[in-house]
Structure formats: C-alpha cells, structure tokens
Image (cartoon, rainbow, N blue to C red):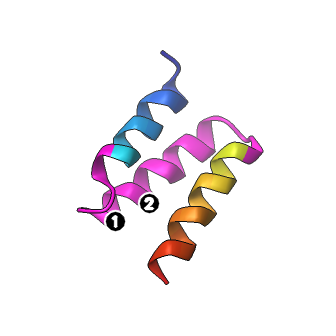
C-alpha cells in the first residue's frame, strides 16, 4: 500500500463524521502524490459541504 492510499482511506473513514480530519488526510495524500485524482476528490468533498 502506498502512502497516498493510506491517507485516502483515512479520509474516507473520517467522512462525513469528522470533516477536519477528512481534509487533513486529503492534504497529506495530495502532498505525497501530485496527481489530478487527489485534487478531484478534494474538490468533490469541498463542493458537497458548501
């Protein structure tokens, strides 16, 4: 399992009960792997909550 996978699974586990933890985990995943998929997941979470 890659580090990015670890943080993605943490984000999914945290959502929707702990949004701060979700965003934090997605930030870590994005910092380890600068790919579009993390940005898409991050934006999706943001759009659902605003």
Q: Residues within 10 Å of mark 2 (few under 14, many from 20)?
A: some
Q: Measuring 50% from the left and 29% from the top, which residue is drawn there?
A: 5
Percent across and percent down for residue 39 are 68, 54
Total numbered circles: 2
Q: Measuring 59% from the left and 53% from the top, which residue is drawn there?
A: 41
Magenta region includes residue 24: yes
**Is 21 placed left or right of 5 in the picture?**
left
Picture layout, residue 21 above or below residue 34: below
Picture layout, residue 48 above or below residue 23: below
Percent across and percent down for residue 22 are 38, 56
- Return the residue at label 2: 23
- Return the residue at label 1: 20
Tell me the CA gap for discs 1 and 2: 5 Å
Q: Measuring 44% from the left and 60% from the top, which residue is drawn there?
A: 23
Q: Which residues are magenta?
A: 13-36
The quarter of the displayed image where residue 31 is located: top right
């Amino acid at each position: 399992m890659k580090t990015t996978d670890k943080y993605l699974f943490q984000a999914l586990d945290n959502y929707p009960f702990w949004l701060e933890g979700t965003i934090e985990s997605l930030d870590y995943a994005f910092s380890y792997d600068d790919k579009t998929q993390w940005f898409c997941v991050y934006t999706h979470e943001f759009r659902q909550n605003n």
